[in-house]
Image (spheres, rainbow, N blue to C red):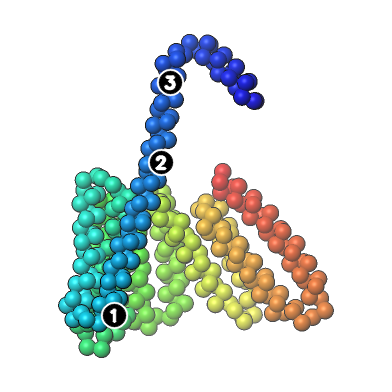
């Protein structure tokens, strides 16, 4: 309907339900207030992110300029200290239930500075730096326990994200130290992240699941291709990618759907170039490949609608 018809319809509804002018003004006023709240919320978030970027850039520039002039204690202090301070400030903000968006930025900064600061401490105070895998295991393990402990008290999603991230990093480090095959490490890490994402997706902390789904899907698909590449079962990779495509409908995530589609596209292109690039049938293969892509695009569109539903 056009504007005049809409006004007529509104007038009819007002008369039918006996709505007063003051009630209309109050309702419209509430809508404007909510809109203003959203605008302020967005602006606050942008300023918080910019603040974090400037803090990180400023400290990085300062450290880079005077690094050679610092002794070991000063190097550790200038890198680890800001991380501890940021974490304390984040905890205080969350404890007072104020500016939770600011606390997220502070948690991110604390993770960056604490991790880098602990590695600097290892390099500065360990002869030769030691085995970096052992250092990574100890540092990531301590940080994972720290963020998980704080999360158990304050229930902040960013704390859960870093506790999982550092725990996975600690596992990869110790697995490499124990000389576990890289393929097995990738499979366990990717599968664990996917399983955790699926479990967390049913909780209030599901905003981190998209990243977990994407990283784990890419890891598993990459591993699958490495395992079957140049073998007689190489074509089975299409089945793996198609299975991940099916899984995307179960977990209802576009960030699983996208890597799966790209895996199929990439393998078909790779297979065609490998076996048919120098043959007379290459133009026909390209045409057939185009029809396959159209078919996959149509299937992906239907899956996307299914996920959205």
Residue that mark 1 sits on = 134
Label 1 sits on a secondary structure element that is: helix
* Residue 207 located left or right of residue 97: right
Of mark 2 and mark 3, the one earlier in the sequence is: 3
* Residue 92 located left or right of residue 305: left
Residue that mark 3 sits on = 25
- Residue 245: quarter of image: bottom right
- Residue 269 in the image: state x and y as whole percent: 67, 72
**Residue 273 shows in this picture:** yes
Of mark 2 and mark 1, the one earlier in the sequence is: 2
Q: Is residue 212 above or below residue 133?
A: above
Of mark 1 and mark 3, the one earlier in the sequence is: 3
Q: Residue at x 62, y 21 (%)?
A: 4
Residue that mark 2 sits on = 39
Q: Are marks 1 and 3 in contact (CB under 8 Å)?
A: no
Q: Quadrant of the N terminus?
A: top right
Q: Residues within 10 Å of mark 2 (few under 14, many from 20)?
A: few
Q: Are marks 2 and 1 in contact (CB under 8 Å)?
A: no
- Residue 181: quarter of image: bottom left
Residue farthest to the left, as pictured: 73
Q: Nearer the viewer, mark 2 or mark 1?
A: 2
Q: Nearer the viewer, mark 1 or mark 3?
A: 3
Label 2 sits on a secondary structure element that is: helix
């Amino acid at each position: 309907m056009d504007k005049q018809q809409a006004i007529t319809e509104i007038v009819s509804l007002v008369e039918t339900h006996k709505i007063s002018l003051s009630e209309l003004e109050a309702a419209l006023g509430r809508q404007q207030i909510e809109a203003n709240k959203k605008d302020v919320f967005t602006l606050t978030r942008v300023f918080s992110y910019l603040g974090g970027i400037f803090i990180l850039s400023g400290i990085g520039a300062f450290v880079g300029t005077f690094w050679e002039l610092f002794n070991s204690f000063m190097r550790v202090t200038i890198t680890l200290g800001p991380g501890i301070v940021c974490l304390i400030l984040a905890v205080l903000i969350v404890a007072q239930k104020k500016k939770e968006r600011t606390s997220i930025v502070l948690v991110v900064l604390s993770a960056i500075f604490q991790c880098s600061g602990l590695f600097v401490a290892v390099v500065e105070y360990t002869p030769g730096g030691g085995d970096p895998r052992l250092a990574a295991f100890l540092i990531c393990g301590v940080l994972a326990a720290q963020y998980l402990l704080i999360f158990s008290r304050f229930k902040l999603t960013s704390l859960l994200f870093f506790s999982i991230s550092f725990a996975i990093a600690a596992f990869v480090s110790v697995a490499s130290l124990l000389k576990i095959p890289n393929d097995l490490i990738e499979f366990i890490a990717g599968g664990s992240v996917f399983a955790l994402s699926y479990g967390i997706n049913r909780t209030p902390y599901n905003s981190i699941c998209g990243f977990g789904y994407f990283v784990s899907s890419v890891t598993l698909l990459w591993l699958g291709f490495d395992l079957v590449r140049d073998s007689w079962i190489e074509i089975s990779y299409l089945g793996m990618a198609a299975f991940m495509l099916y899984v995307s409908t179960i977990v209802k995530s576009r960030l699983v759907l996208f890597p799966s589609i790209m895996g199929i596209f990439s393998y078909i292109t790779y297979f065609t170039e490998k076996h048919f690039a120098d043959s007379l049938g290459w133009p026909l293969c390209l045409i057939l490949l185009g029809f396959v892509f159209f078919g996959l695009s149509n299937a992906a569109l239907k899956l996307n609608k299914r996920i959205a539903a």
